[in-house]
């Protein structure tokens, strides 16, 4: 069989005999149906929107949306949503970068989309701001019960109602990408993100668990619970609405609108049904994050491995198809991500819990995976010496890796996951 996998802006093809394929898993791709704007328009049915329009009438509305590291189809959403905002006295748009860089071409492109759509919708009074944790004025909202100091961007202080735009998918330690994350860490201080993300080391801080999950048995995620508590400290009594999508390669598969908690429950159920898979682990696994922006660098693309690692047996091998045109990660992440990853594995595993620094959960989780596997091959644009220093194995010929697997064991079974950034893998019971 010819297996096509996303790689940066390209598609690469691997030849694998059908009898050697255990599973081919890709994100939810519904049969050809309504286009993006139609699905958003259906979500914004007047029956769902009337409460929102009443809430914003004559009020100062703040809209929080993800930065350029995400792939939410904003243009199609804005075309349907923005004409419904004219009743607000003022609209403040905030691009939620968390600890990411604020000044990027991708964020500038988002600002252009917002400006053009706002002008087309005749929004007379609107303002744009990109959160910059290094430079913005911050307000102290207090401390969560888990000890996180909640410092948030002062630009939202005058907001009376919030609307969050969020593309929902499984998140390897936050449970799901969801509206709460636009508040925390989206518009918060580095310190807030660091303290909250230290909870990523808890085994219950994982995908599929969230305090807003409809299933009571799946609400115990300490990191997500801390984010929710922090959001409440920021929002206080103000209303939070959400327009949610579940998308694949910028094609919306599902959209919903309403009270943030209520609509998140529906989104999580849909995500579980369509993008969570139970598999029998194999000794060989091929993973692609799904192309740009999901494999822009190793820091970003690692999440695909975390979401799918249960598909490979201990002692097995992984072939990671991740372009990483921007290398191992942004400069501000390197000290506690990549540089730590080049330490001896035992040192990474032994040092983290007593000395957590933001981003250091990533080398810790990488080290756990490296330790239990025979090898992680990576096909990327990262220089070979950088890959080898991080205990990974570079290859410029992924087909040869597959061929060697088949030569070693002609009956081997291979699991293939494309678009892994939006997939959650569980082990069959």
Image (tube, rainbow, N blue to C red):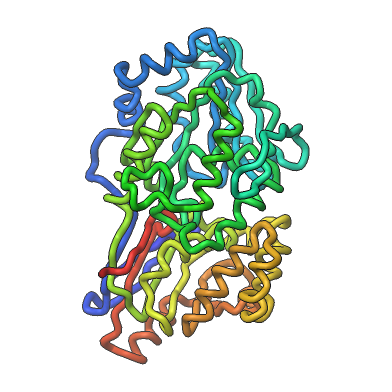
Quadrant of the rendered image containing residue 259: top left
Image height check: is 114 above or below 283?
Answer: above
Residue 234 in the image: x percent, y percent? Answer: 60, 32
Residue at horizontal 50 percent and vertical 16 percent from the top: 120
Q: In the rendered image, which quarter contains the C terminus?
A: bottom left
The x and y percentages for residue 307 are: 43, 61
Residue 144, percent from left and from top: 61, 43
Q: Is residue 9 visible?
A: no
What residue appears at the point 53 percent right and 23 percent down from the top-left corner? 238
Residue farthest along the front direction in this orientation? 145
- Image quadrant holding the N terminus, namely bottom left
In the foreground, 145 or 117? 145
Relative to residue 365, is residue 189 depicted above or below?
Answer: above
Q: Camera-side residue: 329 or 137?
A: 137
Q: Nearer the viewer, residue 264 or 169?
A: 264
Instruction: Where is residue 219? Give x, y as percent.
Output: 40, 49
Residue 169 appears in the rendering? yes
The residue located at (32%, 43%) in the rendering is 214
Determine the residue positioned at 32% across, 27% down.
43
Q: Is residue 272 above or below residue 429?
A: above
């Amino acid at each position: 069989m010819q297996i096509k996998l996303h790689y940066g802006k390209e598609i690469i093809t691997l030849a694998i005999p059908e009898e050697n394929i255990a599973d081919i898993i890709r994100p939810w791709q519904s049969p050809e149906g309504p286009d993006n704007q139609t699905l958003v328009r259906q979500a914004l049915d007047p029956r769902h929107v009337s409460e929102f329009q009443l809430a914003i009438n004559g009020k100062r509305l703040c809209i929080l949306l993800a930065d350029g590291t995400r792939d939410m189809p904003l243009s199609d959403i804005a075309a349907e949503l923005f004409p419904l905002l004219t009743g607000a006295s003022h609209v403040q748009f905030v691009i939620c970068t968390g600890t990411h860089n604020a000044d990027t071409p991708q964020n500038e492109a988002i600002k252009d989309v917002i400006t053009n759509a706002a002008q087309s919708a005749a929004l007379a009074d609107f303002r744009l701001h990109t959160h910059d944790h290094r430079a913005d004025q911050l307000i102290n909202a207090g401390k969560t019960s888990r000890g996180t100091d909640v410092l948030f961007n002062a630009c939202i202080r005058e907001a009376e109602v919030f609307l969050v735009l969020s593309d929902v998918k499984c998140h390897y330690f936050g449970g799901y990408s969801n509206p709460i994350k636009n508040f925390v860490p989206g518009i918060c201080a580095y310190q807030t993100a660091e303290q909250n993300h230290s909870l990523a080391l808890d085994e219950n801080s994982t995908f599929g668990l969230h305090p807003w999950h409809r299933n009571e048995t799946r609400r115990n995620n300490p990191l997500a619970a801390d984010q929710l508590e922090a959001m409440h400290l920021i929002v206080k009594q103000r209303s939070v609405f959400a327009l949610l999508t579940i998308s694949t390669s910028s094609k919306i598969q599902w959209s919903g609108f309403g009270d943030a908690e209520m609509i998140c429950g529906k989104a999580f159920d849909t995500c579980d049904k369509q993008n969570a898979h139970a598999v029998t682990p194999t000794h060989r696994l091929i993973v692609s994050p799904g192309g740009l922006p999901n494999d822009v660098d190793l820091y970003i693309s690692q999440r695909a491995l975390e979401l799918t690692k249960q598909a490979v047996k201990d002692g097995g091998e992984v072939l990671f198809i991740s372009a990483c045109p921007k290398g191992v990660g942004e400069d501000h992440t390197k000290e506690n991500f990549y540089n730590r990853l080049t330490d001896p594995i035992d040192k990474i595993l032994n040092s983290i819990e007593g000395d957590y620094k933001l981003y250091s959960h990533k080398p810790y989780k990488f080290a756990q995976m490296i330790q239990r596997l025979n090898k992680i091959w990576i096909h990327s644009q990262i220089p070979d010496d950088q890959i080898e220093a991080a205990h990974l194995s570079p290859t410029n010929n992924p087909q040869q890796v597959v061929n060697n697997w088949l030569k070693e064991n002609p009956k081997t079974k291979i699991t293939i996951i494309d678009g892994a950034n939006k997939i959650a893998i569980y082990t069959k019971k």
